[in-house]
Every structure is written in structure tokens, then in C-alpha cells.
Image (cartoon, rainbow, N blue to C red):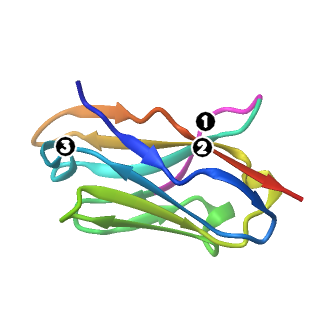
Amino acid sequence: QVQLVESGGGLVQAGGSLRLSCATSGAIFRFATMGWYRQAPEKERELVAVISRSGGTNYTDSVKDRFTISRDNAKNTVYLQIHSLKPQDTAVYYCNAKCDYPKRFDYWGQGTQVTVSS
């Protein structure tokens, strides 16, 4: 069973910072585009940031200046560094591993809660 293990969520005051981590197996990580999504209460899950195997990144506009996605290929881990947290960043953050070629898969982590108090 494929596992994506997330960590780093928690309760933080507005303006604070967090770093989320997501680890998986090398068999998955070496092929995967890794992404972070989030789902706030009563809202749909939305893409936050993605990073390709080669390190190319893409962000949703609302987080571009505050979030940084990175990957450590030696540790099979993807990170999401979050600065200047806002109450509207409160959500469950999910890690995703996706590949269309040469393998085909789409895996999700269990989610980690980020709560930002005002």
C-alpha cells in the first residue's frame, strides 16, 4: 500500500510560519510530480503548489508570495514552507503524488490540519 506521510501542521497565530513535510517511498518519489492541496471547511479541495521531477514549480495566485514548495530527492520528501500565515489559510493540507508516464498513479496523503488564529 502506497503511503504519503504528512507532518508539520498545527495551530499558529496569524503572521507565523510552518513547514509541512510529506515523505513517501523512492519508488514513487522518483517518478512523481508532487503537490500540496488544501481543503477548508465547506469548500472544495484546491491546488496550492506543485513541483515536478525536475524541480519546476507552480503556485496558486493567492499563495505565490508566501508559500514555497521544494523537494529533497535524497530523502524522498516534499516540503511546503509557509510564511505570513493568514486565518484564511486554515485548512486540511493534503500531499499528492502523481505520474502519467512512465508509470501511471495518483496517490494522496491523509492530510494535516493547519489552523491559523487571528
In magenta, the rendered stretch is 42-49
Amino acid of disc 1: Arg
Q: Label 1: few (<14), some or many (≥20) within 10 Å?
A: some
Is 104 within the magenta?
Answer: no
Rendered residue at 33%/33% (across/down): 107
108 or 3, nearer to the observer? 3
Residue at numbered disc 1 = 45
Q: Marks 3 and 1: which is nearer the front?
A: 3
Badges 3 and 2: C-beta atoms under 8 Å apart?
Answer: no
Residue 40 picture location, percent across and down? 71, 38
Residue at numbered disc 2 = 38
Q: Label 3: few (<14), some or many (≥20) within 10 Å?
A: many
In this rendering, the answer to whether 115 lies above or below 111 is: below
Rendered residue at 35%/51% (across/down): 34
Sequence-wise, the earlier of marks 3 and 2 is 3
Badges 1 and 2: C-beta atoms under 8 Å apart?
Answer: yes
Q: Label 2: few (<14), some or many (≥20) within 10 Å?
A: many
Report the label total.
3
96 or 18, nearer to the observer? 18
Asked which secondary structure carries label 1, the reply is loop
Rendered residue at 73%/65% (across/down): 85
Q: Quadrant of residue 21?
A: bottom left
Q: Quadrant of residue 103?
A: top left
Rendered residue at 24%/32% (across/down): 105
Residue at numbered disc 3 = 28
Q: Quadrant of residue 60?
A: bottom right
In this rendering, would 104 be left or right of 51?
A: left
Amino acid of disc 2: Arg
Sequence-wise, the earlier of marks 3 and 1 is 3
Residue 3 picture location, percent across and down? 30, 34
Sequence-wise, the earlier of marks 1 and 2 is 2
Amino acid of disc 3: Ile
